[in-house]
C-alpha cells in the first residue's frame, strides 16, 4: 500500500513523467531501497559487529556514497566492493576512491545487486527493506561460505536467526543492527 502511494507520488513528478515509460518502469522495478545514508556512528557499529579482519572482503549491496567501503578499507584494511544502481552515486564513489588513493582496495560495480555473485565475500552489509532482503536471501544462501557474516541495518532478513541484535540512537532515532552468521537455512 505504502509502495503504491510512493510510486503514484513519484510518477506524478514532472521530471519523472518526461522519461519514456519503459525507462520509468525499469528504474522503479529495479530499486530495492531509496538512498538514505547510514550515520557514521552506525557504520562504525556495523563494522565492529561484523568483526572484519585485515584482508577480508566486504560487499556493501546498495553502497550509496560509499562511506561503508571507505571506512572498511581505511580502518580495517579490508578489501571493499560496492554495488550501486545509481549512476550518479557510482561516479561520486569513484571520485572518493581516487581522491583517497584507495584503488587497490575499493571498487564499485554499477548494476543491480541481485545480479552479483557474492562467493568472494566474507562480510555483506545491507541497508535495504525487509521485502528486498527477502528477495536477496536466496542469493546469499547460494553464494556465501561458512563463516561469512551478513549485517543488516534496520531491516531483518525474514526466516533467518540473528546471532546478535543491537539498537542504538543516532540522529535522534533508534537504529537496529542485525548480524547473521552463515550458513542460514529457512525452514520450509
Ligand atoms: C538505504 S541506501 C544505503 C546506502 C549505504 N549502504 C549506507 O548504508 O549508507 C540504499 C542504496 O541502495 C541502492 N539500491 C537500491 N536498489 C538497488 C539495486 N537493485 N541494485 C543496486 N543498488 C540499489 C540505492 O540507490 C541506495 O543508494
Image: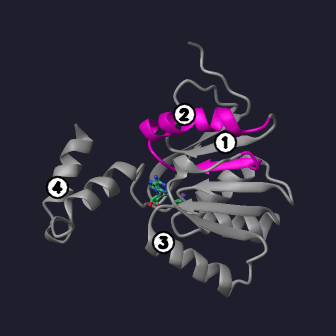
* Residue 114, horizontal then vertical, whole percent: 53, 46
- Where is residue 67 drawn, in percent x and y? 60, 68
Q: Distance of mark 4 from mark 2, alpha carbons?
A: 28 Å
State the CA–CA distance, disc 2 to disc 1: 9 Å
Viewer-side label of 3, 1: 3
Residue underneath mark 4: 9
Position of 34 compared to 64: left or right? left
For the C terminus, the quadrant is top right
Label 3: how many Cα within 10 Å (few below 14, some 14–19, many 20+): some
- Which mark is first along the chain, 1 or 2? 1
When the figure is inspected, residue 127 is found, relative to residue 99, above or below; the finding is above
Rendered location of residue 40, percent (x, y):
59, 64
Q: CA distance from mark 2 to mark 3?
A: 25 Å
Residue at 76 percent of width and 50 percent of height: 120
User: SS class of the residue under badge 2?
Assistant: loop
For marks 1 and 4 on the same chain, the one whose residue lies earlier in the sequence: 4
The question of residue 134 being in magenta is answered with yes
Structural distance between the alpha carbons of marks 4 and 3:
23 Å
Q: Earlier in the sequence, mark 4 or mark 3?
A: 4
Q: Residue at x 60, y 26 (%)?
A: 160
Which residue bears the numbered disc 3? Answer: 89
161 vs 186, nearest the viewer: 186
The span picked out in magenta is: 119-145
Give the mark nearest the N terminus, 4 or 2: 4
Report the residue that reaches farthest toward the bottom. 99
Residue 77 placement: quadrant: bottom right
Question: Which residue is the site of mark 2?
Answer: 157
Query: Which residue is nearer to you in this view: 27 or 182?
Result: 27
- Pointer 1 residue: 150
Q: Tell me if mark 4 has few (under 14), some (14-19) or many (20+) residues whose alpha carbon lies within 10 angstroms of its own.
A: few
Mark in the foreground, 2 or 3:
3
Q: Is residue 133 magenta?
A: yes
Amino acid at each position: 500500500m505504502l509502495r503504491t502511494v510512493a510510486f503514484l507520488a513519484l510518477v506524478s513528478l514532472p521530471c519523472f513523467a518526461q522519461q519514456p515509460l519503459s525507462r520509468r518502469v525499469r528504474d522503479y522495478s529495479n530499486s530495492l531501497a531509496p538512498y538514505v545514508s547510514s550515520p557514521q556512528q552506525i557504520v562504525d557499529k556495523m563494522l565492529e559487529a561484523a568483526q572484519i579482519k585485515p584482508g577480508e572482503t566486504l560487499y556493501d549491496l546498495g553502497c550509496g556514497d560509499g562511506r561503508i567501503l571507505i571506512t572498511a578499507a581505511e580502518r580495517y584494511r579490508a578489501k571493499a566492493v560496492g554495488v550501486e544502481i545509481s549512476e550518479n552515486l557510482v561516479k561520486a564513489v569513484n571520485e572518493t576512491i581516487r581522491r583517497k588513493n584507495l584503488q587497490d582496495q575499493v571498487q564499485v560495480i554499477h548494476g543491480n545487486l541481485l545480479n552479483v555473485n557474492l562467493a568472494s565475500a566474507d562480510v555483506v552489509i545491507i541497508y535495504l527493506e525487509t521485502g528486498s532482503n527477502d528477495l536477496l536471501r536466496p542469493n546469499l544462501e547460494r553464494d556465501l561460505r561458512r563463516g561469512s557474516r551478513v549485517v543488516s541495518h534496520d531491516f531483518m532478513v525474514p526466516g533467518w536467526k540473528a546471532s546478535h541484535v543491537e539498537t542504538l540512537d543516532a540522529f535522534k532515532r533508534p537504529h537496529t543492527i542485525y548480524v547473521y552468521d552463515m550458513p542460514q537455512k529457512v525452514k520450509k
